[in-house]
Image: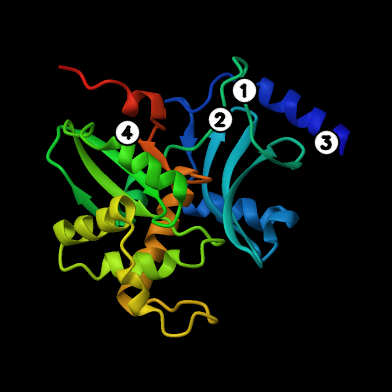
Amino acid sequence: MKKNITILTVLIAGVTTGINAADVKLDTAKLKEIRATTKVLQNPALTIRDGIDKDSVYFLKLDAKSQRGSRIITAFVDKKTGAVYFGNGVNKDGKPMAFPKEGKIIKDGISFSYGTGKKELYLVTDPECPYCMKFEKALTGKLDDYTVHVILYPLPFHKKAPAMVEWIMEGKDDLHKRERFEELMLKKSTEYKALIKDPKKPFKYTAQTQEKISKALKAVEELGARGTPIAYDSKFKEIPRSVLLGPKKK
């Protein structure tokens, strides 16, 4: 294992940059060829989502499925030897290598939006998360310059979150959904409890909400969010909380 990690480090150190104009996006035919000629990538649990021809390697984005769900991972295929290295890479300057975010997937995952500011903000949040509640309170009056796109992400260990999400998403429009969201986050409303038929069984979404949440989860995956709350700018780059929570400019 240590030997493989060392080889991976040397391999990626030879790559000149993260993602740049000289890199060539792999088409569907090439991705199929790589899969057909690389045994480990033929695993049914792995799906090649995207790929880039990068110097001496093919840089791949993979969808890895398991009993816990699916997650995005990256891998590198050595063009010369065919060896495959799973993991994250850095360029010679030590900067992480990553695929450009797919805007359509992220925008399709928006639960609701509000505001008319010129700057865009994508907020990944969980209505049962206590840290999200504190963050929401701290943001009050600080987002006038933004159009905010909320992506609801009910964490698996928050048992009440699905019912909360359902209650929010049953709002008649974005304004109503925002009002319900604030009722939960700022006023700790318990109206969502009326939707829980059997507390001992997993909550079941309506078909419409299930579709929206499925898209939201894909958006979270594409953003690379691993928790809540977390915010991103229009280029899907994470915004430090200190920037959002700093004193409002006059």
- Tag in front: 4 or 3: 4
Disc with the residue nearer the chain's start (2 vs 1): 1
- Secondary element under disc 2, as helix, strand or loop, is loop
Tell me the tag on residue 233. Answer: 4
Task: Please tell me in which quadrant of the rendered image residue 12 appears.
Answer: top right
Label 2 crowd (10 A; few <14 / some 14-19 / many >=20): some
- Tag in front: 1 or 4: 4
> What whole-number distance in Å separates the C-alpha atoms at marks 1 and 3?
17 Å
Tell me the tag on residue 15. Answer: 1
Disc with the residue nearer the chain's start (1 vs 3): 3
Q: Residue at x 20, y 57 (%)?
A: 179
User: Disc 1 marks which amino acid?
Assistant: Val
- Tag in front: 1 or 3: 3
User: Disc 4 marks which amino acid?
Assistant: Asp
Residue 27 locus on image (x, y percent): 47, 48
Q: Are marks 1 and 3 in contact (CB under 8 Å)?
A: no
The one of 40 and 158 positioned closer to us in this rendering: 158
User: Disc 3 marks which amino acid?
Assistant: Asn
Kindly identify which residue carries mark 2.
97
> What whole-number distance in Å separates the C-alpha atoms at marks 4 and 3?
36 Å
